[in-house]
Structure formats: C-alpha cells, structure tokens
Amino acid sequence: MSKLIAFLLTVLAVGNDLNELLSVDDCTDDTCDLSLRQLRGNVTSQKAEWGSCKSYGCSTRYQPHHGCQCNSKCEKYGNCCADIAICSAATPSAPASAPAAAAAKPSGQVYGHPDPSKEYPVYDGFTLTLVEEFNAPLDLDTDPIWTWSDGGLYEGDVRFIKEQITFSDGKMKITAKPNPGIATQKCSHAEVGNVDAKPLVSGEIRARRNMFRYGRYEVRMKAPDVQPGNPDIDGNFIATMFVFRDAKFHHWREIDIEVTGDRKNSVTTNVLSADNTDWWSTRIASARETTCSGNAREEFHTYGFEWLPNKVTWFIDGRVVRTHYGGRPPIPDKSAKIMMNLWIFGPKANFGGKQIHNNRYPMTSEYDWFRFYKWDGESTYPCIGSGSCLTHDDRYLDGNNPCDGQPMEGTWKGKGACKASCR
C-alpha cells in the first residue's frame, strides 16, 4: 500500500492524467481494490481541474474513476460535470444540463404514498413504481403493501414487534430498547418457527409478499446514535434496507444495505443466494465493507442498489460503491420482499460492531423516504393489488405475523408452520 501511495503522489507531482495511469474501465469487485478507489478519489479531489468535461473530454462510457461524468449515463448516476453542455453540443445523446437526475411529477400508476406536489428523479431504463414518503402513519395491519414482522434472528438480541415501528415528523422510526413488558408469543410466522426469549424489542417493516424483483431500490435514512446525543460513540447495531426471500426454507435470496455501529460511516453491502440451506456461510454470500461520507448517525444519506439479471450495483448518495457480476454467489433470480429493520447482534457482537458494551437504549433509526423503480425489462413483478403474478413458490411459507391473513402454505422438513394468535 505504501508503494501505491507513493505512486499516486508522483502522479500529482508530475501532473499526469490518472485516468490513463489507473484505468478501471473493465474492473469488477473481484479485481478492484476499494482502497485504490478511495485513494484515486482523494487524488482527484486534490486536482480540481480534472473535474470537468473540458479536462476529461467527452466519452460514451461511464468512467468510474472520474469525479464527475461526461457521457449519457451521468444523468442516471446523478454526477454530470458542471460543463456537460460541452458534450451536449458534440454528442446529441448527452444531457443538456447537470441535475442530480432528471426530475418529473409521477406519471402512470405509482403505488404507496407519493407526494403529489413533489418531483421525483427519473432514471433511464427504470419506471417509478412505489413511493413511501412517511408523511402520515401507515396502518401496518391493513396497508395493501406493507406489514410488520414478528420475527427474531437466531443470532440477534431483539424480537421484532409492531409497536417499535412509529411514524412522526414525516419519518418512519424504528426503535430498539429493552422489552417494557410487551408479551411476545414463542411462535413466529416470519421465522416459521419458535423464537427464544430476547432481551430487546425492535421493529421490521416488510412487504407482505414476494413480489419485487429487478429494479432500483432507494432509501434515505439515518442510523441511530449508540448513545443519545453522541453520534461519535461506536457500539453495535445493524440498520438496514434489503430484499429477502425464504432463508433456510427453500430459496434463500438476499441483497443488503447494512449501516453498522462499528464506525460512524461504516456500511456493508451483501448479496446472498442459496437453496435448501439452513445456515449462513461465506460460501453462499459475498459481503463488502464500504463507507459513506460524513457521519451516518448524524446525517441522512441515500442508500440503494440496482438489481438486474446480470449484476447488482450499490450506491451511496449517488456514488457507485460496488458492482457484483455474479459467479459466487450468482445474481438472485427470485422475487422477494422489501424489508427495513434495526437489530442488535447479541453479546458476541460478531457483526455490527465489537463495542456492544457502549450501547445505550433506546436506539432509533429514521427513514425519510423509500422508492422503488421497476426495471423496464421486468415483465412479471410486481403485481401490487391483484397478486396475480405470485406463483405457488412465491407464496411458500411467506407469512409475516399472525395478523396478516396470509395462510402459511407448505411444509418444512415434513412439518407445517407453527401458528400464533392475532392479538
């Protein structure tokens, strides 16, 4: 690494074009080192004259090592150079201005609770399909799209309950704290089995059905303080937005954004694909650590991913931080549920931050909004409302809680699912 730093300093000194010396036009997450990307970004920021189309020249390809872009894809990723008009004149397909993304009032059917007065970003190849502004409380027992989870992770210290998901100040808030005496049933419909008693309660909001697949998923959220009023103290938590299906029961599919308590700007991206697998292992998953700019507990950031048949691309505040092209694990191919939750790993703190002794409760993560853009090449999902796209496989053991009215179709290891009562 010291040789790499020395080389980059040499580049600064002699004024060579970093684009030519450190090309990553063909890089994947298997061949690119994240620290190299970060160093490359630092060098770019120190040489401000590079951040323009005048210096870069116009291109037909997205250049991941450029601080801003001078091609037709820059509008999609929200990072056009300020003088993009130079390329607009030379290349008719390039955008004429440099917005974060083109914006427009929603057209066609947009589900959820969009703001009719608001203009939403437009992304080439994607159609805005679902928006939650959280300006008013959602009734998680009757909402046609969203409900709550009664689950609890085997390795986690929390049980999910409806009461820990609240809405105020135009935001959804998920709070983890010691159980104040709320009775929880041993049987969990979300977990499809019994869950041991947990010392903490928290919340998980989730789509009712496995009816979301290829598209762009975005959330603007703020992670919790480990200790109230002090966002710089590290501890243990995992604040998330992800898609998920089945886990150990049949088709385990998962794509994650996980903001964690180990550092103030720590974010983990993860993709997982396995069939008939009881336990997580490195063989079935591919996790990568990255960072957001600033403090994830003090500021809201926009996190998301684009899930396509041939790749998954994660981004933070419009900046691409990782692309997975398949291999091990393969790109998830089954429909899934959208989920957002907050959980604490437990005494061993194997993930989410080792300094769990610093945790003070309550801890609250905040969600400003959520958006889903369907990929225009997706011909099957979602079928919001009718449920007509759902196969028997999509409905397999897909319950969320005992009040959702969804029958637990199917068996696991020859047994039917346990049943809890709606209270």
Image: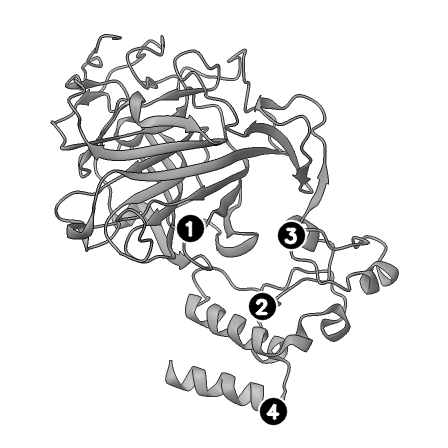
Residue hosting label 3 = 78
The x, y position of residue 93, in whole percent, is 81, 52
Which mark sits nearer the N-terminus, 3 or 2? 2
Name the residue at 58% across, 74% down: 44
Residue hosting label 1 = 327
Question: Label 3, label 2: how many angstroms apart (C-alpha)?
Answer: 15 Å
Q: Quadrant of the C terminus?
A: top left
Residue hosting label 2 = 65
Check disc 1: other Cα within 10 Å, few if <14, some if 14-19, many if 20+: few
Question: Label 3, label 4: how many angstroms apart (C-alpha)?
Answer: 31 Å
Toward the viewer: 36 or 377? Answer: 36
Q: Amino acid at mark 4?
A: Val
Q: Amino acid at mark 2?
A: His
Question: Label 1, label 2: how many angstroms apart (C-alpha)?
Answer: 24 Å
Helix, strand or loop for disc 1: loop
Numbered-mark total: 4
Foreground mark, 1 or 4? Answer: 4
Helix, strand or loop for disc 2: loop
Helix, strand or loop for disc 3: loop
Foreground mark, 3 or 2? Answer: 3
